Amino acid sequence: MTPPPPAPAPAPAPVPAAQLAQLNVAALLHPLDDPRTAPFVDLLDPVNAAADTAPGFVWRLVEEGAADATGLRPAGEHVIVNLSVWQDQDSLWDFAYRSGHLEAMRQRRAWFARHVEAHLVLWWIPAGHLPTLDEALERLADLRAHGPSPRAFTFASSHTAAEAADHLPTAPPAPPRPSPAAHPAKA
């Protein structure tokens, strides 16, 4: 009698549904209200509107009471940030390099200082998670300090959601529930 065949290996744990977060920082050469920056400011609304309707777009950071995030300066007085979430890397790539956004990027040297270190970071997040600026800046710092990894990467050194599964942020734990003994019933 032959022994039964070995049991199949267990299936790998499912990778949580993930989306791609991106942070881009840029140091302004001149204030936003300077006439030399006016062409950039004029592009903000149409480029943001195009992003908002682009295939795969999920969310972008907007300052409260504003149409964009240019008033937020968490990375320095002259540094503007763009933080967004996309369904996948291809959707973000298509918007960045195959839409009207590309024309704005071609003119960036007129408005922004040359980058001396990483200015764009990508990372996978659980679907539905909205990254904070602190989280985004921490990922950028990680990329700058350690180079690309599944935790923080670039278009040129990308990683899949499966590769990044161990680095996905998690929701904060729920506060502990008090035990019944902590709140005895009144007699």
Image (cartoon, rainbow, N blue to C red):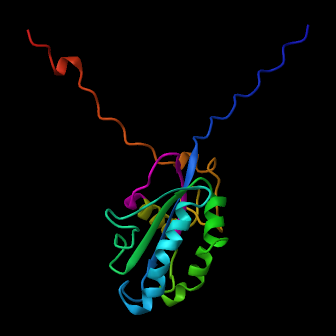
- Count of picture labels: 0
Q: Nearer the viewer, residue 140 or 79?
A: 79
Q: Residue 92's x, y, as percent?
A: 61, 62
Q: Is residue 106 left or right of residue 84?
A: right
Q: Quadrant of the C terminus?
A: top left
Position of residue 145 measured from the top left corner of the image (x, y, whole percent): 48, 68
**Frontmost residue, 4 versus 109:** 109
Residue 185 in view in this figure: yes
Q: In the rendered image of this protein, does residue 80 appear above or below residue 114?
A: above
Residue at x-position 39% and y-position 57%: 132
Q: Residue furthest left?
A: 187
Looking at the image, can residue 151 be seen?
no
Q: Residue at x 43, y 71 (%)?
A: 81
Asked whether, in this view, residue 186 is left or right of residue 159, the answer is left
In this orientation, which residue lies closer to the viewer: 153 or 42? 42
Magenta stretch containing residue 124, yes or no? yes
Q: Quadrant of residue 41?
A: bottom left
* Residue 149 part of the magenta segment: no
Where does the image place residue 73, in percent across and percent down from the top left?
Answer: 34, 72
The stretch in magenta equals 119-135
Q: Residue at x 42, y 61 (%)?
A: 61
Q: Is residue 181 above or below residue 108?
A: above
The residue most toward the right is: 1
- Given residues 114 and 99, the one toward you in this image is 99
Is residue 88 shown above or below 100? above
Farthest residue, direction bottom: 36
Quarter in which the N terminus is drawn: top right
Please state the horizontal and vertical placement of residue 26, each as a whole percent of the image: 46, 78
